[in-house]
Image: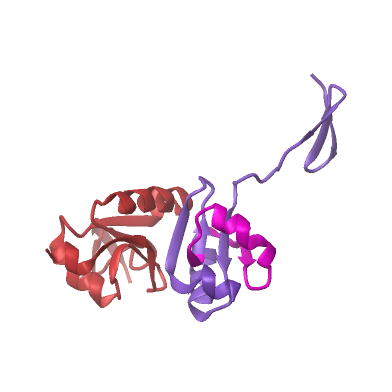
Chain colours: A red, B purple
Amino acid sequence: MNCILVRIPYYIYDGNIAFFKTNAMSKSILYHAGCSVCLSAEQEIVSLIGSENVEIIHLGEQKDQIPMAETHGVKSVPALLTPTGNILHLNYGASMADIKG
Amino acid sequence: MNCILVRIPYYIYDGNIAFFKTNAMSKSILYHAGCSVCLSAEQEIVSLIGSENVEIIHLGEQKDQIPMAETHGVKSVPALLTPTGNILHLNYGASMADIKG
C-alpha cells in the first residue's frame, strides 16, 4: 500500500481519507486552568517529562475540552492524563465546577 | 587542581575531604505506602520519567523517612518530590496520619 503524505496529521491512501491523531496517547495531556498551583505543576511536569511529551490544555480558555477531560476522569486541575489513559491529579488548584463557573 | 577519585561519592582534593551527594536532587522521590492508589501512581510515574530517575520510598516500611518527607511538604501519599524540591501530591491514597497509625 502506498501512502502519500499530504499534511500532518492527515494521510491519503487507497483513494480514501483517513483521519487519525499522530500523537494518539503517546503524549500526556496536562489539564490546567491558569491558577498558581496549575502553573507550578506545569513547570514541574514539563521539567520531568519534557515539553515534547506533554500537551497543555487550559480548560478555562478551551471550555470545549471540558467534556473530554471529564470523560477521562478529571475531577480537578491540575491533572495529568497519561499515555495509558489514567489521570493523575497533581495537588489541587480548582475543581471542574470552579472552571465551568 | 588535581582531583583523585577515591570512591563515589567521596573525593579527596588538595588534602581535604569533601562530602557531597552525587545524585543530590537529580532524581525524584516517590513517597508511597503500598495502597492501590499509590501503586497505580507509581506505575504511571515510572513509565513517564523512567525508573532510573525516581527513587521509591515506602513510608509504611521506612517510617524513619517520615520526618524528612514531612519536611519536604508531603501531606499525603502518593507524592512526588521533584528535583527542584517541590511536592506533587498525586491523587489521594492515604494521609501522613494514616501512615503513622
Q: Position of residue B85 (x, y in %)?
A: 52, 47
- Who's the residue at 65% across and 61% down the image? B65
Q: Residue furthest top?
A: B1
Name the quadrant containing residue B35.
Answer: bottom right
Name the quadrant containing residue A67.
Answer: bottom left
- Who's the residue at 52% across and 66% down the image? B47
Q: Quadrant of the N terminus of chain B?
A: top right
Between A22 and B22, the residue placed more toward the observer is: B22
Q: Position of residue A55 (x, y in %)?
A: 31, 56
Between A32 and A29, the residue placed more toward the observer is: A32
**Residue A15 can be seen, yes or no:** no
For residue B17, side relative to residue B37 (left or right): right
Q: Is residue B73 magenta?
A: yes
For residue B8, side relative to residue B45 (left or right): right
Instruction: Write down the region rendered in magenta.
Output: B49-78
Q: Position of residue B73 (x, y in %)?
A: 50, 55
**Residue A49 can be seen, yes or no:** yes
